[in-house]
Amino acid sequence: MQPLSFGNFSLLLVGVAFLWGCSKDPVVQPVIDRIEISGPNTVMRYHEVDLEATAYLSDGTVANHVTITWQSSRPDVATVNGNGKVTGISAGTATITAVAADVTADVEMVVTENPVTDIEINVPEQTVISRRIPLQATITMESGLTMSGPQLVSWSTTGPAQITDNALLATDSGSVNITATAGAVSRQKSIYVKAWEETEIDPYLAQPAAGAIKVVPVVIIRILPTADGINIDATQDVQYGGGGEISIADMKSRLLRFDKRIKFALEEGSRFRGYKTPSAPPYLGYKVVKYIDYYKPQPPNYSIITKVEAGKNVYSPHYFKMWQMFNMRDLVENQGVKEVWVWVNGTATPNFPNYDPNIHGNIPSVGGWESNMAGPYGDVSNSDRKTNDMPVYNKTYIVYQQNTRRTHAEALHNHGHQLEAQFSHINYYAFWGHFAGKWTGATPPYGRAGDTHFPPNATSDYDYNNTTLVLSDIEDWTPNATGEKKLVNRDTWGNIPYNWPEADGLEQKVESQWYIYWWQNMPGYQNNISWSATHKMSNWWEFVADWDGAKAAGKNLNQPK
């Protein structure tokens, strides 16, 4: 047998050493043995205390870098966050537990009462029907701690209002009392609810048309009766067009769209033959100076009956009451307001399609005129022209009643009739005979410039969409009918590319464009139309811009050359 070489011997020793190493016992790692919680075990309601939890290993040393979570057995009594901060919620006892791995520790936390000693109700002293007011309260407790929030108290109300989701919604005008209660303490606050509010004016309505020669200040009033503060009250909303449910917000959006179109049409209509003369400036620029929302029915003036329908009196709107509320005298006399547009749906008139005597029989019927005028020169309007139905100030103003359930087109229609009333008052035959072509005995189609109801080719009232071509001198009108005639029909005015605002879904477009086209063909600014050898046509829009000034100066529809 050969002796082992040194190299082999070394290899053998290494192998022995490897075997000895494998036979050693494994190292035992210490584990979490217990958790200890330190800190107070009582807390007052709404106060906070901090707990600390320490985890110990089986060898008695502190376990560092251990994640400890916290739990409460009664979150309605006390809550605890991830850092061990305990908040007292209500009087009682809750078990607070610290957890690390599968080891737990508990502490009984006693929450002691902390009575509320005072409540401050943080709401405004005044609101408006339909506006939601968030409710807020600040409570003070026996410990001196103060806390704020709507959920700290219970709320109740008396009066025309309701509380939902910690917010007050007023449904009628008057005083509303709200009560906040926490524990044995209650506090009350009275809020006055107004029936109307001023609304922010849309920039388009606040700015007259660019280049306008004269500015016509306007007040817009929207009558939006509501019984619940959310929807239009269908029992008070029964005029043509239907009285179905619509929210106040949707009605406001609808009427704003119409207001923009009305303003545009009136301004565009004062551009003399602007449809073919792009450089013609608008003589009139309309500027809305006040935008008012009134959330109750238009009040009746029981002393003025406008008509009787099916044995039921229809009363004039109570302008005296409304105008005092809105300070209309100042608006007319000092701020130059010349027109008031009142959006309203008639109430409880028997001949309206959705009138129901079981619902509307005891509701007073109120019906205003399409246009009504008051001022130092009397009432020249499309009304019965009573001089006692509206306050008379030292300047003239015109009120237009516009139907919320119809569109801008009917509102423009009202303006057309008002122009007819004013222009024919100045010179009846010049307007109705020469311009409109409705001489006594004439039958439609009139072939001249027409009127609010009758385009030149119309054969009956409201015949705006007639496709029959008729010769008319409307675009080259002269009093003696020497102007060039052309064939016109609905396409003549219906296809003019007027730059309508809110043009999407434009209702009654052909009718609406008839009004603009008709107005643009009236003798306007710098018209140079001859009346006779010595006279020419006036700018008729001067009577709209300043009725009092035109009347005082004795102006006519024609003037010396």
Image (spheres, helix red, strand yellow):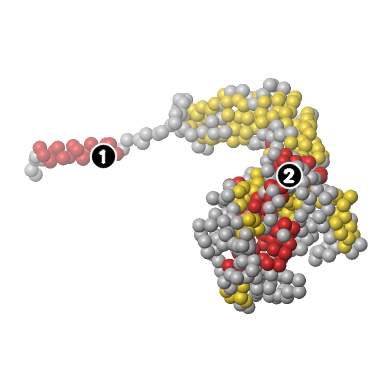
Q: Residues within 10 Å of mark 1 (few under 14, many from 20)?
A: few
| Secondary structure category for the residue under label 1 | helix
Nearer-the-camera pick, 351 or 463: 463
**Residue furthest front in the image:** 533
Query: Closer to us: mark 2 or mark 1?
Result: 2
Q: Is residue 189 visible?
A: yes
Q: Position of residue 446 (x, y in %)?
A: 68, 73
Q: Residues within 10 Å of mark 2 (few under 14, many from 20)?
A: many
**Residue contact between numbered discs 2 and 1, judged by CB atoms under 8 Å:** no
- Which quadrant of the figure has residue 460? bottom right
**Residue furthest right in the image:** 311
**Quadrant containing the C terminus in the rendered view:** bottom right
- Which quadrant of the figure has residue 42? top right
Q: CA distance from mark 2 to mark 1?
A: 119 Å
Please name the amino acid that badge 2 sits on: Lys
- Which quadrant of the figure has residue 29? top left
Left or right: residue 514 versus residue 301 is left
Mark 1 = which residue?
19
Q: Residue at x 62, y 73 (%)?
A: 472
Vertical comparison of 72 with 376: above or below: above
| Secondary structure category for the residue under label 2 | loop
**Quadrant containing the N terminus in the rendered view:** top left
Left or right: residue 371 versus residue 215 is right
Q: Earlier in the sequence, mark 2 or mark 1?
A: 1
Q: Position of residue 182 (x, y in %)?
A: 75, 31
